[in-house]
Image: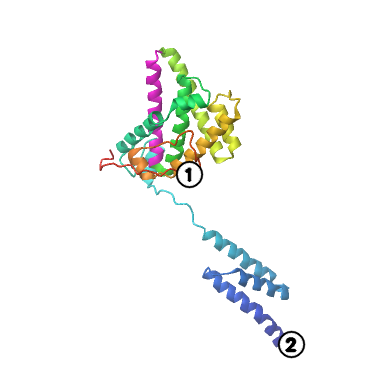
């Protein structure tokens, strides 16, 4: 009777031993697990052991999932950045600053603002110009934040260049110091509120993005749904196009080309022209 009981346990022990060996070598399959579960139906006394192996298989599958790679930063760099300073970057800082200025220049000089004013029924004012400019600056910031610490460093100087330009334009228009200070404060609040709204919209549905554009670009005064649809399509295709640009070229040159507001085939991505630069990044 004792020998018969041992013989009845050998199939279960053999199945458990086989799957255990496969688990150690990360080669376990659904077939082997299925066969093991089938055997356990015949030997209910070993049910707990089977559950342990199934849990171990799940843990192995989690460990094998590749984790997103992050830029390695030394302890000294973390210390000085915690104090508010910027540590060593992948590229020279002054090159990144020049590229940031060029990127902002692309947001200003390579965008047809009159087209936006006409298609979106926006008044031709400094504030309307700023609302269109901040939309393109935001798209650049989203793209450069993907380039690690160097990209974030570049974002700071893109925004810095924008505020310097806004202040100079307000001076040229003859706005006095008191009103200029108040206007810059209001624009700053509008800008950072728009960043949060656009970030939420681009990561969500078109309805959320349209709501963000209605609040931040149209100042809650758009009554034509076709205008909102046009701008949602513009942002989506523009983000798709900017994501296709090489990050290293953007860090070294800051050259960004914008797709037109209206085009026949909005779903197609234009061929990306690789910018040229010399050893100095110029």
Q: Residue furthest right?
A: 1
Q: Which quarter of the figure is the C terminus placed in?
A: top left
Nearest to the eye among marks 1 and 2: give it: 1
User: In the image, is residue 264 part of the stretch drawn in magenta?
Assistant: no
Disc 1 element = loop
Residue extent of the magenta highlight: 150-174
* Colour scheme shown: rainbow
Of residues 15 and 95, the one drawn nearer to the viewer in this rendering: 95
Disc 2 element = loop
Q: Main secondary structure of the magenta part?
A: helix
Which residue is tagged 2?
A: 1
Q: Residue at x 58, y 25 (%)?
A: 222
* Image x and y of residue 173, in percent: 40, 15
Q: Residue at x 30, y 40 (%)?
A: 92
Q: Which quarter of the figure is the N terminus placed in?
A: bottom right
User: In the image, is residue 163 part of the stretch drawn in magenta?
Assistant: yes
* Image x and y of residue 58, in percent: 59, 62
Of residues 100 and 218, the one drawn nearer to the viewer in this rendering: 218
Label 1: how many Cα within 10 Å (few below 14, some 14–19, many 20+):
few
Label 2: how many Cα within 10 Å (few below 14, some 14–19, many 20+):
few
Residue 148 in view (yes/no) = yes
The residues tagged by marks 1 and 2 sit, at their Cα atoms, a distance apart of 76 Å
Q: Is residue 102 rendered to the left or right of residue 58?
A: left
Q: Which mark is residue 268?
A: 1
Residue 83 in view (yes/no) = no
* Image x and y of residue 82, in percent: 41, 38
Numbered disc total: 2
Q: Which mark is residue 228?
A: none
Among the two numbered marks 1 and 2 on one chain, the one whose residue lies closer to the N terminus: 2
Task: Confirm or deny contact between disc 1 and disc 2 (CB under 8 A).
Answer: no
* Vertical arrangement, residue 220 with respect to residue 35, above or below: above
């Amino acid at each position: 009777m004792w020998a018969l009981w041992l013989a009845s346990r050998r199939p279960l022990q053999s199945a458990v031993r086989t799957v255990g060996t496969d688990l150690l070598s990360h080669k376990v399959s659904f077939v082997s697990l299925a066969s093991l579960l089938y055997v356990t139906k015949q030997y209910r006394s070993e049910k707990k052991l089977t559950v342990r192996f199934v849990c171990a298989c799940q843990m192995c599958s989690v460990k094998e999932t590749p984790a997103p790679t992050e830029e390695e930063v030394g302890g000294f760099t973390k210390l000085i950045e915690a104090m508010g300073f910027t540590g060593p970057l992948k590229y020279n800082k002054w090159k990144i600053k020049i590229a940031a200025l060029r990127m902002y220049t692309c947001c200003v000089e390579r965008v047809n603002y009159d087209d936006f004013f006409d298609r979106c029924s926006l008044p031709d004012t400094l504030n309307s110009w700023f609302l269109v400019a901040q939309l393109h600056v935001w798209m650049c910031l989203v793209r450069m934040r993907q380039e690690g610490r160097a990209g974030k460093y570049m974002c700071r100087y893109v925004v810095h260049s924008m505020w310097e330009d806004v202040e100079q334009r307000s001076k040229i228009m003859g706005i006095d110091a008191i009103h200029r200070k108040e206007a810059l404060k209001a624009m700053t609040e509008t800008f950072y509120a728009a960043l949060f709204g656009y970030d939420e919209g681009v990561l969500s549905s078109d309805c959320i993005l349209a709501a963000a554009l209605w609040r931040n670009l149209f100042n809650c005064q758009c009554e034509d749904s076709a205008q909102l649809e046009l701008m949602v399509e513009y942002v989506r295709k523009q983000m798709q196009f900017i994501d296709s640009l090489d990050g290293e070229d953007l860090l070294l040159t800051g050259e960004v080309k914008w797709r037109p507001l209206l085009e026949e085939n909005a779903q197609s991505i234009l061929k990306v022209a690789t910018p040229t630069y010399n050893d100095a990044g110029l």
